[in-house]
Image: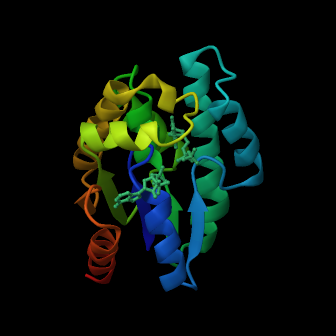
C-alpha cells in the first residue's frame, strides 16, 4: 500500500502522521520533498526560495520526486509506505503551470506510479488564516491565504482527474475524529 497524506500548509498532516506512526509501527514513513539524501539538498534549495525562476523551483521538486519514487517507493513495494505529501502537492503547488502539463511531468517523474490511498485534509479559509497566524511562515506560506486556498482547490481537482482512491476530510474537525476517519479508510 502506498498511502499519501495531503493538504496545504497547516492542514494537520504532521499531527495525523505522528498518530499513524504510533499505530503502524512496521510501516515506512517518508516525505516529499526530502525523503532521500539528494532530496534533502533539493528540499533546502526549494524551500529557502533560492530559485529565482518558478520553472527551476518546479524542477527541484520533480527531481526530488523522481529520486523518492526510485529509492523509497519502489524498494518498499511489499510494505505499507505512508508519505507526507506526493505528486498531488507537486501538481497543485506549481499553480502557474497548466494542470494537464503538470500531470504529464509528474507522471514522468514517478514512472506512472500512483498512490493507492490519498488522504486530503481540507481547511476552510478562516481556519487557515488562524493557523498561519499562530506560526512563523516560510517562503511558500508567506504567499498567503488566497494562494493556498487556490492550491487546495487544485489538489482536489488533481485527485479527481487522476482517478485515485481518496478520502477528503474536513481538517477543522477534532484531531481524534480525523484519526478515526483515516483508520477506517485504511482498513476498508
Ligand atoms: N484537527 C485539528 N484541530 C485544530 N488544530 C489542529 C488540528 N490538527 C492540527 N492542528 C494544529 O494546527 C497546526 C498545524 O498542524 P500540522 O500538523 O503541523 O500541519 P501540517 O503538517 O499540515 O503543516 C499545529 O499547531 C497543530 O497543532
Ligand atoms: C511536494 C511539494 C511541496 N511543495 C511545498 C509545499 C510546502 O509549502 C513546502 C514543503 O512542505 P512541508 O514539508 O510540508 O513543509 P513544512 O515541513 O515546513 O511543513 O513545499 C511544493 O511547492 N511543491 C511540491 O512538489
Q: Position of residue 5 (x, y in %)?
A: 42, 59
Compared to residue 97, the image places residue 108 above or below, namely below
Residue 89 horizontal side relative to residue 51, left or right: left
Q: How many marks?
A: 0
Residue 82 horizontal side relative to residue 38, left or right: left
In-front residue for pair 100/89:
89
Residue 69 horizontal side relative to residue 17, left or right: right
Q: Position of residue 107 (x, y in %)?
A: 45, 44
Query: What residue lies at 57% left-to-right and 85% top-to-bottom?
Result: 25
Say how the picture is coloured.
rainbow
Query: What residue lies at 64% left-to-right and 24% top-to-bottom?
Result: 49
Compared to residue 110, the image places residue 22 above or below, namely below
Q: Position of residue 80 (x, y in %)?
A: 50, 77
| Quadrant of res 56 | top right
Query: What residue lies at 47% left-to-right and 75% top-to-bottom?
Result: 20
The N terminus - image quarter: bottom left
Compared to residue 113, the image places residue 2 above or below, namely below
Q: Position of residue 103 (x, y in %)?
A: 38, 37
Judge whether residue 159 can be spotted in this image: yes
The C terminus - image quarter: bottom left
Residue 70 horizontal side relative to residue 6, left or right: right
| Quadrant of res 36 | bottom right
Query: What residue lies at 25% left-to-right and 59% top-to-bottom?
Result: 169
Judge whether residue 104 can be spotted in this image: no
In-front residue for pair 94/103:
94
Amino acid at each position: 500500500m502506498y498511502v499519501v497524506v495531503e493538504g496545504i500548509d497547516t492542514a494537520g498532516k504532521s499531527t495525523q502522521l505522528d498518530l499513524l506512526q504510533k499505530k503502524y509501527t512496521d510501516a515506512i514513513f517518508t516525505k516529499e520533498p526530502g525523503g532521500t539524501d539528494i532530496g534533502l539538498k533539493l528540499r533546502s534549495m526549494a524551500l529557502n526560495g533560492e530559485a529565482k525562476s518558478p520553472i527551476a523551483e518546479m524542477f527541484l521538486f520533480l527531481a526530488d520526486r523522481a529520486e523518492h519514487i526510485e529509492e523509497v517507493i519502489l524498494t518498499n513495494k511489499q510494505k505499507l509506505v505512508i508519505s507526507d505529501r506526493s505528486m498531488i502537492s507537486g501538481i497543485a503547488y506549481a499553480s502557474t503551470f497548466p494542470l494537464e502539463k503538470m500531470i504529464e511531468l509528474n507522471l514522468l517523474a514517478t514512472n506512472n506510479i500512483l498512490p493507492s490511498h490519498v488522504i486530503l485534509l481540507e481547511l476552510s479559509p478562516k481556519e487557515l488564516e488562524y493557523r498561519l497566524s499562530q506560526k512563523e511562515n516560510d517562503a511558500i506560506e508567506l504567499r498567503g491565504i488566497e494562494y493556498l486556498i487556490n492550491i487546495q482547490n487544485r489538489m482536489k481537482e488533481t485527485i479527481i482527474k487522476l482517478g485515485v482512491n481518496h478520502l477528503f476530510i474536513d481538517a477543522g474537525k477534532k484531531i481524534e475524529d480525523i484519526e478515526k476517519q483515516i483508520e477506517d479508510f485504511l482498513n476498508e
